[in-house]
Amino acid sequence: MNKETKIYIAGHKGMVGSAIWRALSAKGYQNLIGASSKELDLRNQQAVKDFIATEKPEVVIDAAAKVGGILANNNYPYQFLMENMLIQNNLIDSALQAGIEKFIFLGSSCIYPKFAPQPLKEDYLLTDTLEPTNEWYAIAKISGVKACEAIRKQFNKDYVSLMPTNLYGIHDNFDLTSSHVLPAMIRKFHEAKENNHAPVSLWGSGTPMREFLFVDDMAQAVVFALENRLPEHLYNVGTGEDLTIKHLAETIQKAVGHQGEIIWDASKPDGTPRKLMDISKMHALGWKHEVALDKGITLTYKWFLENIDRFKEVKM
């Protein structure tokens, strides 16, 4: 790998893809390419094949996906299953057919069984049933992991899958109908603060444990996988530390400066009780996260405030 290597980042406008672009640019990589969803529909097989054939990247990083929280996954199961499979299958197969030697596939910790032992090891994949509220997305991502594993096994190409824990950060999604828990909380607490510190209602009991990784740390893990040939096909990426949703809410409330009441709506689902990643394999290879949760939340809230005009159109 050198600084002139042509690298295609699918999903380069999204939170993860843009963080990867920033990280690679900062390291001096000068030959990065991307295409917006308007320029290239990744669900269109022929369009993706043509793009890969024309641009001839040497590496493909798949940071493109249809993503969302519990509500979005529950309401649109078919789209979360089918659109994600179309996106990743088109990218993976086009890369293979074009003879591309290195492919980095990004997934999610939701690929692991709902009641798998904690912390989650890579070996727990396909050992039990999934969390029902996001099994559609999980099944799609599992198929991507297995496709990359099959290519690695059959064709001996460096196709590797990185499974991040819950990501958050700059360019996050703050739309309350489709966002994940951390950015949704930032927006809720901010708008409640602006509304005379009104009470904030949050889903569930607050007792589930969750792990969060700042997106720039995830980008550094991708850079690490790019610059090294990892010996196995699947790696967890996280902090190795978790906290309750209640503790998360209180941390965000403090960062935002909201002084009102938090009301927990126990009639709403909690999701998986705990999802802590075993990241010993990545640690053994030499990668570790750097950004602490409180610092990451502060940076994310700062970016939210700087870009708040774009979120005002989407009401609570």
Image (cartoon, rainbow, N blue to C red):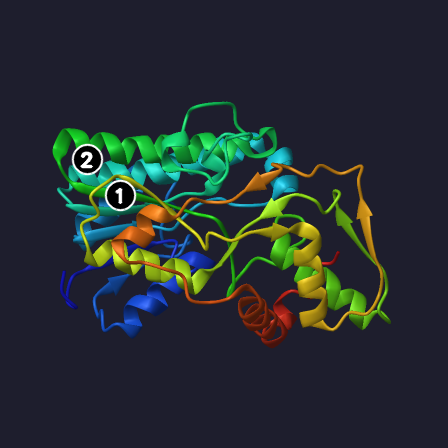
Q: Nearer the viewer, residue 86 or 24?
A: 24
Amino acid type, callout 1: Val
Q: Position of residue 220 (x, y in %)?
A: 34, 62
The N terminus - image quarter: bottom left
The C terminus - image quarter: bottom right
Q: Residue furthest top?
A: 128
Amino acid type, callout 2: Arg
Residue pictured at 23% horizontal, 29% vertical: 150
Query: Is residue 44 shown to the viewer in this render?
Result: no
Compared with residue 290, is residue 47 higher up or lower down, i.e. above or below?
above
Q: Position of residue 262 (x, y in %)?
A: 81, 57
Circle 2 SS class:
helix
Circle 1 SS class:
strand
Is residue 104 shown left or right of residue 310?
Answer: left
Residue pictured at 29% horizontal, 42% vertical: 91
- Mark 1–mark 2 distance (CA, rounded to whole Å): 8 Å
In the picture, the disc for residue 152 is 2
Quarter occupied by residue 73: top right
Q: Are marks 1 and 2 in contact (CB under 8 Å)?
A: yes
Q: Which residue is mark 1?
A: 160
* Mark 1 vs 2, N-terminal side: 2
Compared with residue 177, is residue 189 higher up or lower down, i.e. above or below?
below
Compared with residue 208, is residue 286 higher up or lower down, i.e. above or below?
below
Residue pictured at 45% horizontal, 35% vertical: 111
Q: Position of residue 163 (x, y in %)?
A: 40, 44
Q: Position of residue 59 (x, y in %)?
A: 20, 52
Query: Is residue 157 shown to the viewer in this render?
Result: yes
Q: Nearer the viewer, residue 140 or 54?
A: 140
